[in-house]
Image (cartoon, helix red, strand yellow):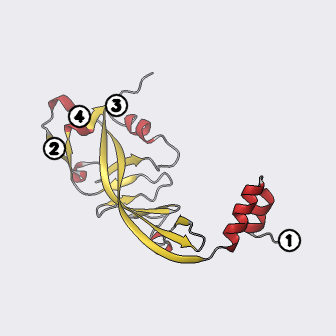
């Protein structure tokens, strides 16, 4: 059995002398500093709402998950697997709700002795993601997204976002969800 390490594979597939030199430098460099980063992150969420006439609504109103069938508000997002998030939401309601959710994004910045920096996954935070259960965390290498309380990435393979808290909605978050033919 032949074991080839990742660096050897990179050497094999480097197409130019510059690429080969870059891989050689990366193999020789040493990590000198690591900084954990937790920063604000906005995630656009989409939901189709049935039987709602945006022309006959007050400027603000509340969507209450307790009045929904599953006691949840469901959203798609740009990281959903297998669907166009906007088209999926449009197909599930007469009105498209676009909601901006304030989240956190976690990662590490690693600095090397050659002066280069890389964004890397923060393994401690990433380990909180539960791919087969509802979880406030979702890993998108090198980042881990953390949702606020009352929100989670669902256990489903597509990773919809569920919300169990009432949301204040303004009319400017709504648009007709007709899909052009």
- Which residue is found at the position 42% from the left and 23% from the top? 180
Say which element carries label 1. Answer: loop
Looking at the image, the residue that sits furthest to the right is: 1
Q: Mark 4 and 3 residues: CB-CB less than 8 Å, in contact?
A: no
Q: In this orientation, which residue lies closer to the viewer: 181 or 118?
A: 118
Whole-angstrom CA distance, mark 3 to mark 2, is 19 Å
Say which element carries label 3. Answer: loop
Residue 61, which numbered label?
Answer: 2
- Label 3 belongs to which residue? 177
The answer to which of marks 4 and 3 sits earlier in the sequence is 4
Q: Mark 3 and 2 residues: CB-CB less than 8 Å, in contact?
A: no
Residue 103, image x, y percentages = 34, 59
Q: Nearer the viewer, mark 1 or mark 3?
A: 1
- Label 4 belongs to which residue? 52
Residue 88 in view of the camera: yes
Whole-angstrom CA distance, mark 4 to mark 1, is 63 Å
Q: Mark 4 and 1 residues: CB-CB less than 8 Å, in contact?
A: no
Q: Is residue 1 above or below residue 77?
A: below
């Amino acid at each position: 059995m032949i074991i080839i390490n990742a660096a050897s594979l990179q050497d094999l597939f480097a197409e130019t002398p510059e690429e080969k030199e870059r891989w050689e430098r990366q193999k020789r460099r040493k990590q000198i500093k690591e900084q954990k980063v937790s920063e604000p992150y906005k995630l656009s969420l989409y939901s189709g709402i049935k039987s709602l006439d945006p022309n006959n609504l007050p400027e603000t109103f509340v969507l209450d998950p307790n009045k929904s069938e599953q006691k949840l508000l469901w959203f798609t997002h740009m990281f959903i697997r297998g669907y166009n998030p906007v088209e999926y939401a449009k197909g599930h309601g007469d009105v498209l709700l676009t909601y901006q959710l304030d989240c956190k994004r976690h990662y590490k910045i690693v600095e090397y002795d050659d002066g280069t920096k890389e964004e890397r996954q923060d393994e401690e935070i990433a380990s909180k993601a539960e791919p087969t259960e509802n979880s406030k965390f979702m890993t998108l290498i090198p980042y881990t997204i953390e949702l606020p309380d009352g929100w989670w990435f669902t256990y489903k393979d597509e990773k919809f976002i569920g919300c169990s808290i009432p949301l204040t909605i303004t009319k400017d978050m709504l648009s007709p969800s007709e899909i052009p033919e």
